Image (cartoon, rainbow, N blue to C red):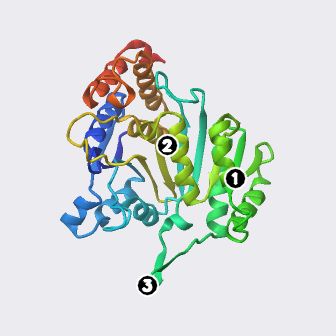
Amino acid sequence: MKHIITLIPGDGIGPEITSAVVRIIEAAGLDVEWETHILGAQAQEKYGTTLPDEAIDSIRRNKVALKGPIMTPVGKGFTSVNVGLRKALDLYANVRPVKALPNVPCRYPELDLVIVRENTEGLYSGLEHVVVPGVVESLKIITEKASRRIVKYAFDFARDTGREKVTAVHKANIMKLSDGLFLECFEKVGEDYPEIEKEDKIIDNCCMQLVMRPEQFDILVMENLYGDILSDLCAGLIGGLGLAPGANIGEQGAVFEAVHGSAPDIAGQGIANPTALLLSGILMLRHIGETETADRAERAMLAVFAEGTHLTRDLGGSANTADFANAIVEKLGSADVAAG
């Protein structure tokens, strides 16, 4: 069947890596029509808003989007487009698989875990105001509804993918009401999944355990800010954000994105690594039921990594963005990749 997918190239290196990934996905055999939209600074200049209705409506209509990185100003300017997009579409589950790739030097080459992060509330939402000059108050909102929803998603994800353990990450020893509510929801929802092992870890201890023995974890579920921090920590264990895919999933649709920044310092040079967005695209293919296409794309990518002759500069190679994409497309044409 033909799919209509919203495409948001992003800014900085976004258009370069998005173009490469689109080419690979199409070469893998997806019958697709792309609806291209802009967000962020480009949209602000053209439409007077960073989140134009046309883009939001497109995602609602198509139920799925592939999104390149979009710059967020630090300490000034417009608020995060990523946060705004998640709120506008109630994309409550942020899913960040962490799996090492061949030929990439890292501390834990066998690592394979998943971060499931609540996406709509908590401190990361940025609800803050000036109480008096020199005093700022930030609001951490935790609700039973959102907590139960994300915990259920994590357990369902474990059941659907054959994973065996879910760990709740919290700071309920100090924030007894807010994180306490999250932990209580975890324990109650977990009762419906007797076959899945359950545990909880205090956030600071969890950070230490992830650095020392990450293999003990399978799926970790947590509130918003903890998830933002731990997902980047885990990406560092396998080689960096350039290798980390991300999905934002809700009832109104799903947005698959590269979780790294827009890297304006190398934009336009054609040297960016598109792996993170490609992995996100592979997640997207599985989400829309194109499992065979996803498997082909993944096999071709892994073959290129295993050979190690067309890796980008950030991975110690000399290939540019187009070289890397060309190598994967060439693999897609080979009989072994096509047949699996």
Between circles 2 and 3, the one closer to the viewer is 3
Between circles 1 and 3, the one closer to the viewer is 3
Label disc, if present, on residue 287 of the rendered structure: 2
Q: Which circle's residue, 2 or 3, is located before the other in the chain?
A: 3
To which residue does mark 3 refer? 133
User: Marks 2 and 1: in contact by CB < 8 Å?
Assistant: no
To which residue does mark 1 refer? 168
Indicate the quadrant where residue 309 lies: top left
* Vertical side of 173 occupied by 113: above or below: above
Mark 1 vs mark 3, CA separation in Å: 37 Å
Please name the residue shown 26% across and 56% down the image: 38
Type of amino acid under label 3 = Pro
Q: Which circle's residue, 1 or 2, is located before the other in the chain?
A: 1
Using residue 263 as the reference point, say whether residue 149 is left or right of it.
Answer: right
| SS category of the residue bearing label 2 | helix
Give the class, few, some or many, for how many residues have Cα within 10 Å of label 1's Cα (few <14, many ≥20).
many
Which residue is the extreme one toward the top? 335
User: Marks 3 and 1: in contact by CB < 8 Å?
Assistant: no
| SS category of the residue bearing label 1 | strand
Mark 2 vs mark 3, CA separation in Å: 48 Å
